[in-house]
Image: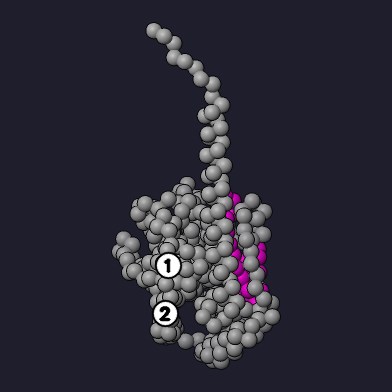
Amino acid sequence: MPSPQHLLLKQFLAAATGPLARQRPRLTTMRLATEAAALFQFVPWNVFLEETDVDGMAAEWLRPAGAPAGRVLLYLHGGGYVLGSLNTHRSLVGVLARSCQLNTLVINYRKAPEYPFPAALDDARLAYDWLLAEGYAAHNIMVAGDSAGGGLALALLLHLRDAGQPLPAAAIGLSPWTDLVLPTATLRQVCREESQLLEALEIRGWGGMYAHETPLAHPLLSPVRAQLHDLPPLLIQISDAEVLHDDVLHFTQKARAVGVPVTLQVFGGLVHWWHLFWRFVPEARLALAQVGDFARGVWAAQEAAQAVAERASQKARSATPYRPRPQV
C-alpha cells in the first residue's frame, strides 16, 4: 500500500500534468517547465558539487563526504532522451551518491530531436572512456540511470561488451526504459487511466525522436531485444503501476536465462520517477537505500573474490618444490 505522502504526490501530479497531457505541449515548453521545477531542488547535506568538463561535454561531480577516491558512479539522467539536464536530477543524484558512498559523475548528454541516436550513447561512451583515462579501473566503476537514462546505461553495457571493452562492475536501472517500441495494444492493457495512456503515447513519440531513422527495435535503443549474455551484475527497480513494468520483467527474465545476475526490486502502486521525490516520499528513500546496499554488496563480493584469488596464488607458490640451481 503506497504511503499517504505518495498518494498526495500522485494527486498533485495528476492535477498538474493531466491537462498538459491533453494539450500536448511543445517540447520547448516542457523543457522550460522541467528546468523551472529544478529551481526547487537542492544538493543534499554533506554532498559537494564540483563542475567539470568531459572532453567538451558539460558534467559535474557530486562528492559525498568520506567517499573513497578509487571508486566512482557514472550517472545518466532520464527524460525520454529529449528532456532533463544536470539541473533536473542534481538532488536525486546527490542523495544516490550519498547512499552508495560513491563520487558520482553526471553528464549533460545530447538530446533528441536535435541530436538523435547514437548521440546520447556516444556521449555515455565518451564519459566512460574519460573515467578510464582519468585512472579509474573498469572494475571500480558502476553505471546507473533512471528511465531513459536507465535504458541508456544498459545500452552502454551492450555497446562495451560487443566492442570487447572492459565492463563496469555493475549497473543500476531505476525504472529503466528497455523497449522503445511500446505497442499501442500493450499500452492500452497497461494504462489504467486516460491521462496515463496519453502520457505513454507522448513518451513513445520521444522514442521516435531519438531513434530518428534507426528502427525502434534496434538492440541499442531497446535493450530488451538484445542478446544479454556476459553482462555484469544488475540492479533494477520498477513499480508495478508503471507503463514500463512488463518490459522490465521481460528484460529481467531474459537476462537471468543467460546467467546474468539480476536483482529485481518491484514496488507496489508507485508513479514513474518516484525516486525524484525522495525528500517527502518514504518509498523513494527506501529504494535509494536499497541501491546503496546493492553497491556495497558488489564491492564486498569483489573484495571476497580477490581475497580468494590471492590465497590460491599464495598456496600455489608455496606448493612449488624448491629446486636448487645446479653448480657450475
Which one is nearer the viewer's eye here, 180 or 83? 83
- In the image, what residue type sits under mark 2? Phe
Image x and y of residue 146, in percent: 52, 70
Residue that badge 2 annotates: 42
Which type of secondary structure does the marked residue at label 2 adopt? loop
- Chain-order first, disc 1 or disc 2: 2
Residue that badge 1 annotates: 64
Q: For the residue carrying disc 1, how many other residues have a C-alpha within 10 Å: few (<14), some (14-19), or many (20+)?
A: many
- In the image, what residue type sits under mark 1? Pro
- Quarter location, residue 3: bottom right
Point out which mark residue 10 bears: none
Number of numbered markers: 2
Residue 313: say if magenta. no
- Quarter location, residue 131: bottom left
Image x and y of residue 128, in percent: 41, 57
Which segment is the magenta one? 228-250
Tell me the residue at 44%/72% (across/down): 94
Q: Can the viewer see residue 152?
A: no
Q: For the residue carrying disc 2, how many other residues have a C-alpha within 10 Å: few (<14), some (14-19), or many (20+)?
A: few
Which one is nearer the viewer's eye here, 319 or 285? 319
Tell me the residue at 55%/70% (across/down): 288
